[in-house]
Image (spheres, helix red, strand yellow):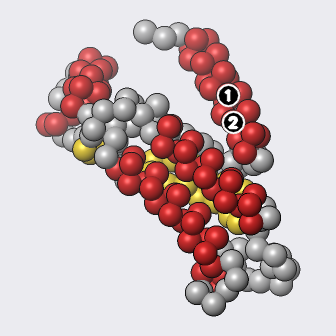
Amino acid sequence: MESMQEMEARWKKEREELTAFLKELGVNYPECGYHVGEGWKPHVEVALRKVAKIAKEAGLEWNLSQVKQKFCQLRIYYHVETPGVTRENHDSLTNPWIWEENHPLHHVYQEIEAAVSEAEYACDQTCEQCPNPAKPGAASGSKLCEACNAAWKKAYQEKYGEDPDAL
């Protein structure tokens, strides 16, 4: 079992690697956090690289607010800076009018949403902890393959002395 010092060292290394990856994309570490399992990381990285490329080609700034698993699904929260729209002159930073078909940047926003949607779909089919196919795990609140779900159940039973399926 991993000691607290080993865990903290691993977390620090992972944070440094993630920060370097995000810096390469031109965004900062999200203020609300970034946490997905190893199985989902490749899908998220592909999506974020696509978003960065699309935004750069369109001359738009963007930032990442949060990346996480919620209700067994990937969530990527981001904001694309819209030219001429600031906090002072618009009520909503999400700028819903931007998504209207007649806006000149509509196709750009559609491409960005498609990149995020592709990652969401891929993660919906994948174990959070490994690249194997998965479905939501019983009582775990996670999307795990059979092997990872069995390992989680075993660890839970060892730690708490009860079967998570019996809850």
When asked about the image quadrant of residue 94, the answer is bottom right
Q: Amino acid at mark 1?
A: Glu
Nearer to the camera, 77 or 111: 111
Nearer to the camera, 61 or 15: 61
Nearer to the camera, 47 or 158: 47
Q: Are marks 2 and 1 in contact (CB under 8 Å)?
A: yes
Task: Residue 30: give x, y in percent of width and height.
Answer: 69, 48
| Distance in Å between CA atoms under marks 2 and 1 | 6 Å
Tag 1, which secondary structure? helix
Q: Is 154 on the left-hand or right-hand side of 29?
A: left
Q: Could you tell me if residue 153 is visible in this image?
A: no
**At 63% across and 56% down in the image, what residue appears?**
51
Q: Is residue 161 above or below residue 55?
A: above
Q: Is residue 30 above or below residue 3?
A: below
Give the class, few, some or many, for how many residues have Cα within 10 Å of label 2's Cα (few <14, many ≥20). some
Q: Is residue 60 above or below residue 6?
A: below
Q: Is 1 on the left-hand or right-hand side of 16?
A: left
Task: Residue 8: give x, y in percent of width and height.
Answer: 62, 19
Q: Quadrant of the C terminus?
A: top left
**At 26% across and 34% down in the image, what residue appears?**
145
Mark number, residue 17: 1
Residue that badge 2 annotates: 21
Q: Is residue 71 above or below residue 95?
A: above
Q: Could you tell me if residue 52 is visible in this image?
A: yes
Q: How many marks?
A: 2
Task: Residue 1: give x, y in percent of width and height.
Answer: 43, 9
Tag 2, which secondary structure? helix
| Farthest residue, direction left | 166
